[in-house]
Image (spheres, rainbow, N blue to C red):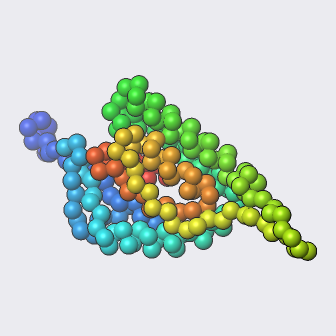
Amino acid sequence: MACCPTSSSTELDVRKTYKLFVNGEFVRSESGRAYRPDGKVNVPRGSRKDLRDAVRASRTAFPGWAGRTAMNRGQILYRAAEMLDGRAAQFVQLLGGGARARRELDQAVETLVWYAGWTDKLSQVTGTVNPVAGPYFNFTIPEPTGVVAITAPEVAPLSGLVRRLAPALCGGNVVVALAAESQPLAALTLAEVL
């Protein structure tokens, strides 16, 4: 005698519930609100307090990320590209499958790899010695600015987000990203990768 029936009529339809990614942790939205962009999963709707918490956490994390060497930031971005490529099947499925989804994933991976290579070259390319009249030197050296806010595009939600995210991280900035409302799953899963 079985303790639990195995009939398909008794199975519960449990939808996956995503969480916000703040300060390296997945947290529930303060408001508790959620929506279903595709009818299958629950996606949190962040509140103003959630946004304030994300900005506060980013400001706290900024000195640590900006203080890393350019080479170390490049290694981290390259590792993120490897992890994204390692979960290719999952991302292609989230993006709707097919050749177009695979192309978008490949663009996102290539963008991360490209900016990973730029981290240690950025100061040499954009920095300079400025000619001035007088017995002193004038240097221009790029420095991280702090917290950068990014909104993911509705079209190409993964590669578009990575194209906005990678340059900011390459330059030593920290990011608060807002996922596209119509297709948020790629951004939320990217947070799992990072």
Camera-side residue of 14 and 190: 190
Task: State the quadrant of the N terminus.
Answer: top left
Camera-side residue of 181 and 38: 181
> Which residue is pictured at 51% across the width and 46% down the height?
163
Place of residue 5 in the rendered image (x, y in percent of width and height, measured from the top left): 11, 40
Q: Give above or below for 14 relative to 6.
A: below
Place of residue 10 in the rendered image (x, y in percent of width and height, measured from the top left): 9, 41
Extreme residue toward the front, this view: 133
> Which residue is pictured at 19% across the width and 43% down the height?
39
Camera-side residue of 14 and 21: 21
Camera-side residue of 31 and 130: 130
Q: Can I make out residue 25 in this image?
A: no
Place of residue 71 in the rendered image (x, y in percent of width and height, measured from the top left): 71, 54
Extreme residue toward the right, this view: 135
Label total for image: 0
> Which residue is pictured at 40% across the width and 54% down the height?
151
Relative to residue 156, is residue 129 drawn left or right?
Answer: right
Relative to residue 119, is residue 109 drawn left or right?
Answer: left
> Which residue is pictured at 61% across the width and 54% down the height?
170
In terms of image quadrants, where is residue 183?
top left
Q: Can I make out residue 106 in this image?
A: yes
